[in-house]
Amino acid sequence: MKPAGYIGLILIVIGIVALAYGGFSYTKREKIIDAGPLQVSADKEHTVPLPPILGALALAGGIVLVIVGNKK
């Protein structure tokens, strides 16, 4: 398989994950108070949405690359 086929497989996996989950979230620790030895921090969760069209485009592009990568 050519490198285009491998990239296509990666895009297919990314597209399926993007369509299945719709985004991802992460937690970031932020300092609230920093006064000498006294430090107060809070964990804030941030969500990054992935639009379904992005997953569909990655999936379609991956399929095309796999087909092109397998042609001899």
Image: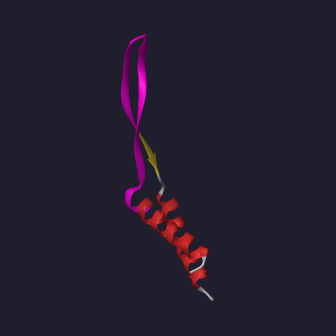
Residue pushed farthest top? Answer: 36
Q: Nearer the viewer, residue 42 or 21?
A: 42
Q: Is residue 30 above or below residue 58?
A: above
At 51% across and 61% down in the image, what residue appears? 53
Question: Residue 7: x, y in percent?
Answer: 56, 69
Quadrant showing the N terminus: bottom right
Apparent side of residue 25 relative to residue 55 in the rendered image (left or right): left
Is 7 part of what is drawn in magenta? no
Apparent side of residue 67 relative to residue 27 in the rendered image (left or right): right
Question: Residue 55: x, y in percent?
Answer: 49, 62
Q: Is residue 39 above or below residue 5?
A: above
Quadrant showing the C terminus: bottom right
Question: Residue 32: x, y in percent?
Answer: 41, 20
Which of the 4 image quarters holds residue 64?
bottom right
What secondary structure do most residues of the magenta stretch adopt?
Answer: strand
At 48% across and 69% down in the image, what residue appears? 12
At 53% across and 65% down in the image, what residue appears? 58
Is 35 part of what is drawn in magenta? yes
Read off the magenta span.
19-45
Q: Is residue 2 above or below residue 33?
A: below
